[in-house]
Image (tube, rainbow, N blue to C red):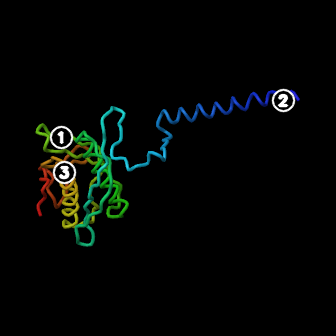
Amino acid sequence: MKCKKYFYYYIPVVFFFFVGILFFLIHKDIVVVKFFWNSKNQEFILNSKDSYIKRKDIKFFYFKDDKLLSDSKKIVWFKDKVKLLKHLVNNWLSFLQEERLVTNSIGLDTVCLGQDGQTAYFSFDKYLFDSDWPIYYKWNFIESLLKTIRESGLDISSIVFLVNHKIMQDDHLDFSFAWPIGGFK
């Protein structure tokens, strides 16, 4: 009889304990709550620094079966050009991995802009190409990246390719200079 009396006191305590955990997870953005009555296709997302970020459809270009193809994806569009370039290229690389066009997992570690704001320095964590790729595939791989960035509308004129903050070395292609965003085609 005595246990039954205390049992009714534990029910609200346990309930509010779980409600507190839920509010904590929502506050730390571990759990995201979306309300259905406001489920319109949101064009803008509010960032933690009170700057607006836009979602935009981007064409990802890739080289497959001796053709330059494209696929449209919606990505987050940041106001900061450095953050946007890193996000765009990493999404493009992830897309290529999903399509199994590259075998190794490649990521863009660092993006820096030159003093003029027109030259971008990309430092990848690994070498971009497979070792058995011919020059034609390597060249078209770079061309598809350049076209993806060019068609996205970013104001960049050239890109310097680095691996672990050192100039990328290749037997076929020369990466000691900046590649123009217009490509060589």
Q: Neighbour class for label 2 at 10 Å: few (<14), some, many (≥20)?
A: few
Q: Amino acid at mark 2?
A: Cys
Of badges 1 and 2, the one in the foreground is 2
Name which quarter of the figure residue 134 lies in.
bottom left
Q: Residue 11, percent across and down?
A: 72, 32
Mark linked to residue 113: 1
39 sits to left or right of 110:
right
In the image, residue 55 above or below residue 147: above
> Residue at horizontal 32%, vertical 51%?
75
Q: Neighbour class for label 1 at 10 Å: few (<14), some, many (≥20)?
A: some
Q: Residue 125, percent across and down?
A: 30, 48
In the image, residue 165 above or below residue 50: below
| Helix, strand or loop status at disc 2 | helix
Work out how far the residue at label 1 is from the one at label 2, CA to CA, in angstroms: 69 Å
Residue carrying label 3: 153
Q: Which residue is outermost to the bottom?
A: 65
Q: Which residue is outermost to the right?
A: 1
Nearer the observer, 167 or 92: 92
Residue carrying label 2: 3
